[in-house]
Image (cartoon, rainbow, N blue to C red):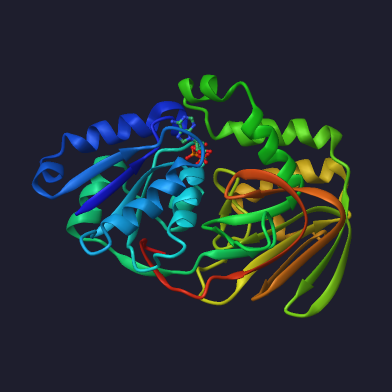
């Protein structure tokens, strides 16, 4: 049995359209496929855990049709079900997870590939402790970022021009527009980091981002050489940089050329502690929030995800 979790509003309606096309495929009728639509924010998380519990002995895989935000909810719903196989059919506006996993096919072709010749490979999600609750960890598929990154995500999520950009097929511009807006008002932050026990003060931080794979912000190659690793995450720090230089840096990041800037540093670490005196904006898989401290590492379980990288 293949279970679909479809976010119909992802990508300004692309999620519904992609699913409607997949549903017409003879393979959809032939195999046992069932679809569940999300109806509100957070619904994908509860759906995923309910479906995994209800069909745990019969499910071949859960297929997520949506954006990175929907995937984020699903991986959190599956926290207690690491054995459930997961596949992603991108239909959002950013789709960084699909880039990070080298999913080159789209829509019906990707659906057929998942059912007929899947490439199940291990994946280790990022795990954040203490960010929203002391008792429950939060998982991420792509990245968590603090500072500028968090403020840009918050502006992107509040933006009123999303639908227009989608109609014009310019969704990738959404992040860039928010970035320029936030750049004008952004005040650098002071943070204290601990990378595998080694303390490091980051003064005038532009951003600190921890990622599982190279992509973020709708196609920017933030850590170009990152590969999905069982133990370590990649930490990119941008500090003491002028706003003008940031602008230049963000043009080069699409090609992964920003690492030559002296203000940019990349580390690998298994456990990362982040602490600030004042609440700081963060984004996790594109969802925004505020926090003062948290600890980030890899989850212990291995999951099987359809991917090529
Ligand atoms: N029926 C619904 N109505 C309104 N919001 C929904 C519904 N179902 C899910 N959502 C919310 O829609 C939000 C956006 O989803 P998602 O991130 O998957 O798409 P996107 O923003 O277009 O893509 P990306 O994150 O890749 O840019 C999520 O926060 C999710 O909780």
Q: Position of residue 59 (x, y in %)?
A: 24, 59
Report whether 14 appears left or right of 186: left
Taking depth in this image into account, of 249 and 140 the one nearest to the observer is 140
Residue name at image x 46 percent, y 38 percent? 92
Taking depth in this image into account, of 128 and 113 the one nearest to the observer is 128
Report whether 167 appears left or right of 245: left
Q: Position of residue 3 (x, y in %)?
A: 27, 49
Report whether 109 appears left or right of 94: left
Above or below residue 246? Residue 309 is: below
Residue name at image x 56 percent, y 63 percent? 212
Report whether 191 appears left or right of 89: right
Q: Quadrant of residue 292?
A: bottom right
Taking depth in this image into account, of 243 and 39 the one nearest to the observer is 39
Above or below residue 118? Residue 283 is: above
Residue name at image x 60 percent, y 62 percent? 137
Is residue 170 something that shows in the picture? yes
Q: Specify the quadrant that holds the N terminus.
A: bottom left
Is residue 99 something that shows in the picture? no
Above or below residue 131? Residue 178 is: above
Q: Specify the quadrant that holds the C terminus.
A: bottom left
Residue name at image x 43 percent, y 30 percent? 9
Q: Quadrant of residue 60?
A: bottom left
């Amino acid at each position: 049995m293949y279970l679909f979790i479809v976010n119909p509003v992802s990508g300004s309606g692309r999620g519904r359209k992609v699913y409607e096309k997949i549903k017409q495929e003879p393979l959809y009728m032939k195999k046992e496929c069932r679809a569940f639509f999300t109806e509100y924010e957070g619904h994908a998380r509860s759906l995923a855990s309910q479906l995994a519990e209800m069909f745990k002995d019969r499910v071949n895989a859960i297929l997520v049709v949506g954006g990175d935000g929907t995937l984020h909810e699903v991986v959190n719903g599956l926290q207690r079900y690491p054995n459930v196989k997961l596949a992603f059919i991108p239909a959002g506006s950013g789709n960084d997870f699909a880039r990070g996993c080298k999913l080159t096919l789209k829509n019906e072709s990707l659906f057929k590939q998942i059912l007929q010749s899947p490439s199940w490979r291990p994946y280790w999600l990022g795990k954040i402790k203490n960010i929203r609750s002391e008792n429950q960890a939060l998982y991420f598929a792509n990245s968590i970022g603090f500072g500028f990154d968090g403020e840009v995500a918050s502006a992107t999520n509040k933006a009123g021009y999303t639908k227009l950009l989608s109609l014009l097929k310019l969704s990738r511009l959404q992040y860039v527009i928010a970035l320029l807006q936030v750049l004008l008002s952004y005040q650098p932050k002071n943070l204290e980091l601990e990378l595998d026990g080694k303390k490091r003060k980051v003064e005038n931080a532009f951003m600190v981002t921890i990622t599982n794979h190279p992509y973020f912000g709708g196609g920017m190659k933030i850590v170009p050489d990152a590969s999905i690793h069982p133990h370590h995450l990649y930490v990119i720090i941008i500090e003491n940089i002028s706003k003008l230089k940031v602008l230049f840096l963000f043009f080069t990041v699409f090609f992964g050329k920003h690492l030559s800037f002296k203000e940019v540093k990349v580390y690998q670490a298994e456990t990362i502690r982040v602490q600030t005196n004042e609440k700081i904006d963060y984004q996790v898989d594109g969802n925004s929030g505020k926090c003062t401290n948290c600890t980030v590492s890899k989850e212990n379980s291995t999951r099987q995800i359809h991917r090529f990288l």
